Amino acid sequence: MIVVDWNDIQVSGSKSGNKKALCPNCSHTRKKKTDKCMSVSFSLGKAYCFNCGAVSFEDDNRQSYTEKVYELPKQDWQNFTALSDALVKWCEEVRGIRQSTLMDFGITEEKQYIPQVQKEQNCIVFNYFESGVLVNKKYRDGRKNFTQSKGGKPIFYNINSVVGAEKVYIVEGEFDVLAMYQSGVKSVISLPSGANDNDDYWTNSNEYLSDVKRFVIAVDTDEKGLIIREKIAHRLGKYRCSFIEWKGKDANDDLLSGNILESIKNEKTFPVTGTYNAFDLSTQINELYQNGVPKTIAPQKTCFGKLGDIFSTLSGQMTVVTGIPSHGKSNFLEWYVLNLIDEFELKASFFSPEHSPMEMHMANFIQKAVGKPFYADIDNVAKCTPDDIQRFIEWSKERLYLTGGGTGEVVDWDWLLEKFKEQLFNFGINIFVVDAWNKVQMPKGLSGKDGIDQTLTRITAFCQQNNVQVYLVAHPTKMKKNERGQYELPQLYDVSGSADFRNQTHNGFSIYRHFGESADEQSTDFFNLKTKFSFQGKINDCVKFRYHMPSGRYYVDGVNPYTFDLTESGKKEAIDFVEEIVITNNFKPNEDFDFTPSKDCPF
Ligand SMILES: [Zn+2]
């Protein structure tokens, strides 16, 4: 890792935005001495040379800001420069990676305890640099076991190469980064933990990636790779992504078979915006023909009865939820969304200023998720235990997010939709809930019916462009009573201020509570007010629910409401962390083995 002094970089004009400059390290040695190969980002205070890989930063200790505190590895990586012959030969002959590439990336060779085999092994070490700071180390032994330094900062591998880049490639492993680099692609990063998607490395890489115009997702061509490709595109927004389908398994495979440049050239786009003919859409048309209309989303558990038959949704849709105040529309929606994220592996974000403070809002979710009261025993149901709460925290931490109003001021739609975009990137949210419409102000300059209509248009466009769902709780303004003095079921036309609540929304439902004397007379009815496509449900149909007081759950007659716990199914895959790491001062590479060129790594 070559680090050049920030003050040695000369740019013309103002020191702001992204600039190109000569590289103090390599420009004077190059044939094209005037080629500005160094990219400087003044907003990040970082620079990267696309020719020699040198980095520079304005402030030595400046890492990107994070709320979490990371325990960084010892900053002694510069000492690990000697690589054994065996490792260099293996990389060259089995992986097709040249020694100069290994040097450019500061790759080292060290002994490390590997939990999978319970002993110390000689490892190739991928050092994760952010500017000149070593933020994480990933160890790989000869049997493809991985481990990494405990408490290191999760971030994309080779994040420095993103500084000032217009187009960034994303691959699945470190060897793929090296393969791409050798083929001339310099701005390339890899997921730090293979096909595992988690929030931390996205949050930590946010400031680097947010201004990048184009991404090319070049992950592995296998089943897991397809899933992760979708997840990455979802976070980044498909409109700025394209993808590569490797001929072999991954970039490294295609480097070995000599196909890498051709694969890179065959970049494919996601259909989102633009102009298409039937040929462009042939994959989608065939899928529709083979599988019929797309699968809709609705809770499947028996406590929801036939709800899925009368009402369901699709990604990219907006759903308006209405009902008379105190009839339980928020409560029902929370139960509904909790089950969707559980059954379909989705992530939801709630903006519910009416339900502050947030810990009390979370207490509602805990009751529903574990099926027990939070504060005290109710009707012989014991309150949840500290273990239940801990399990919920684990289960929900990468599924359920609450959005606060920031400074405590009233927020407007400009702020909220911007916030949602940020959450989409950082957390990969699929469902946004706004509870309620009247808690968010019109953007400046908009008001009245026109303002409402324009805002609704923006929300529906947001859903479609990002392939997410928005559930918008909206109170009715007009509440009519029938002859018996009971309120009538609110319709979408009754929602505040505009017929567009009916016209623009894709879907809508109403929650209506019957307050009877006996338990039999009490129910909460779900009415389908609108579904965009006929296969999504039956407009005006209704399902009757009972309310389970101890847990806050809704259930249909004849079903026990608390036989299951949502938090007990949510085990997630995780990369193995080193239990206790001692970075050994093993500066000398291990020479104890023979080199035999084979698919198995010899070191
Ligand atoms: Zn350079």
Image (cartoon, rainbow, N blue to C red):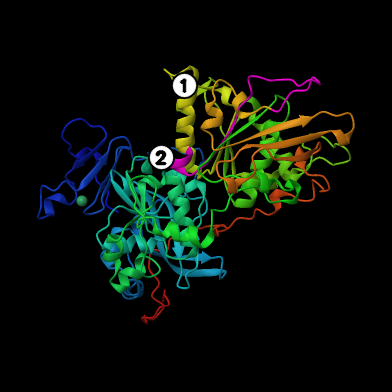
Q: 58 or 300: nearer the eye?
A: 300
Q: Label 2 sits on what residue type?
A: Ser
Quadrant where the N terminus sits is bottom left
Residue at 42% from the left image edge and 45% from the top image edge = 236
Q: Which residue is mark 2?
A: 64
Residue extending farthest to the front is 483
Mark 2, residues whose alpha carbon is within 10 Å: few (<14), some, or many (≥20)?
few
How far from the left and from the top, in percent, is residue 79? 35, 58
Q: Is residue 450 above or below residue 376?
A: above
How far from the left and from the top, in percent, is residue 152? 48, 50
Say left or right for 108 vs 319: left
Quadrant where the C terminus sits is bottom left
The reply to whether the magenta stretch includes residue 469 is: yes
Closer to the chain start, of discs 1 and 2, is: 2
How far from the left and from the top, in percent, is residue 271? 39, 50
The reply to whether the magenta stretch includes residue 246 is: no
Q: Which mark is residue 451?
A: 1
Q: Which quadrant of the structure image shows residue 41? A: top left
How far from the left and from the top, in percent, is residue 386? 75, 43
Q: Which residues are magenta?
A: 463-489
Q: 195 or 63: nearer the eye?
A: 195
Q: Secondary structure at mark 2?
A: loop
